[in-house]
Image: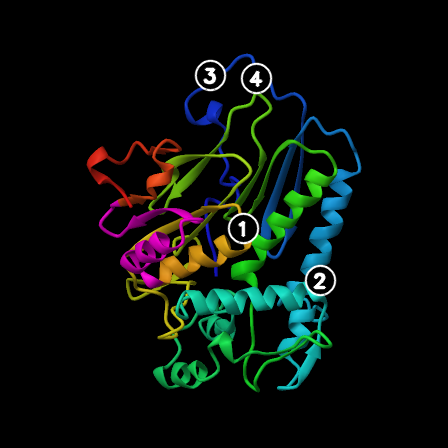
Amino acid sequence: MKKLLSMLMSAVICASIITGCDINPVFQPDNKETRKLIAFDTVIDITLYDVEDEDVFNVLEYWIDRYENRFSTTIETSEVSLLNNNNGTFQQVSAETFNLINRAVNANEITDGAFDIAVYPIVKAWGFTTGEYKIPENEELRRLLMFTGSRKIQFNPDNLSVRLLTGMQIDLGGIAKGYIASKLYEKAKEKGVKSGLISLGGNVQAIGSKPDGNPWYVGIQHPDYENDYIGVLSITDEAAITSGGYQRFFERDGKRYHHIIDPSTGAPSESDILSATVITKDGTMGDALSTAFYVMGSEKAKEFLANNPQFKAVILTKDYKVLVSEELKDKFELGERFFLSDLYYI
């Protein structure tokens, strides 16, 4: 269900690229090491600076592979796939999978159902898992909606087992990338890395600051212009996670249908939001919230942010208002396609 600051461009733009070359001639990043991987049907870019332990990339790749083999819906032997095909009985899983599903259910509760990992059968019905797109009949959607609602998931903490009701299936894609980026951040820190960036699709995790001490600059892609930006964020040791319906969609009879499903209707969300970016140290919940905001709309998103100040956001509405958390006033620069009159602090 996600997300996204531009997958192929890693959604991460250094300040020297955004504002012109040689902005800081003292900072010459020749101590940079990078890896590009494919996992979870997503391009993963890892950039680290001043690497002291050369084993760090092998460690990160090991954990990426491990997470994919636990959380993927496309690997038949993954824990999630086995759970999805367990015919309504309890399935024992690892502590990590157990806890992540628990966090997803918590995200469902605090967003009043706007984030729901149990919409997977509906996502499949629209063809977003295979690329063979179709518009499901209303009767089919009504039937599938009976199996949504991740609060129906049952847990047995005694043996770390999970039960989905018969007909239910889950997809952790809307929360797992934020979780994985956070874990890779921790693994890199354990290996002594002080500066770097990890990008999983629309999930950007900053490790420390840039080697010159300045914050990292992250461009939030404009949903209507591939090479332009809503604005640029300054982040240090934080995640910036974006959801938008502009990355994965199809068109029928002149109407666009995107992949972010509203769990209350079974159809692509029709809220007033074009793009929602969450900035937080809790990448797991930030991942879920970026989707939830997109579904719930700007008014409910603003209400949630007011009650949960540990999360900050940049939201673009369909009438091109840019809503920015007050705490980001000195950490956000508006893109060139917007005027100051388009900017609203929330």
Q: Position of residue 89 (x, y in %)?
A: 66, 86
Residue 53 in the figure: left or right of residue 38:
right
Marks 4 and 2 sit apart, C-alpha to C-alpha, by: 39 Å
Q: Circles 2 and 3: CB distance less than 8 Å?
A: no
Question: What is the three-letter code of the residue carrying label 1?
Answer: Gly
Q: Is residue 123 above or below residue 173?
A: below
Which numbered disc flags the more N-terminal residue, 2 or 3?
3
The three-letter amino acid code for the residue at tag 3 is: Ile
Between the C-alphas of marks 2 and 3, the distance is 42 Å
Specify whether residue 253 is in view: yes
> Element under label 1?
helix
Q: Residue furthest top?
A: 26
Q: Secondary structure at mark 4?
A: loop
Query: Earlier along the polypeptide chain: callout 3 or callout 1?
Result: 3
Span of residues in magenta: 296-321
Left/right of residue 239 with respect to residue 97 in the rendered view: left
Contact (CB < 8 A) between labels 1 and 2? no
Q: CA distance from mark 1 to mark 2?
A: 20 Å
Q: Amino acid at mark 2?
A: Asn
Q: Residues within 10 Å of mark 4 (few under 14, many from 20)?
A: few
Crowd band around label 3 with a 10 angstrom C-alpha radius: few (<14), some (14–19), many (20+):
few
Q: Residue at x 72, y 52 (%)?
A: 63
How many other residues sit within 10 Å of disc 2, few (<14), some (14-19) or many (≥20)?
many
| Disc marking residue 23 | 3
* Residue tagged 1: 283
In the picture provided, is 166 more to the left or to the right than 139?
right
Percent from the top left, x then y, of residue 41? Answer: 59, 56
Between disc 4 and disc 1, the foreground one is 1
Q: Which residue corresponds to mark 2?
A: 69
Residue situated in front as seen by the camera: 135 or 38: 38
Q: What number is the disc on residue 27?
A: 4
Sequence-first disc among 4 and 1: 4
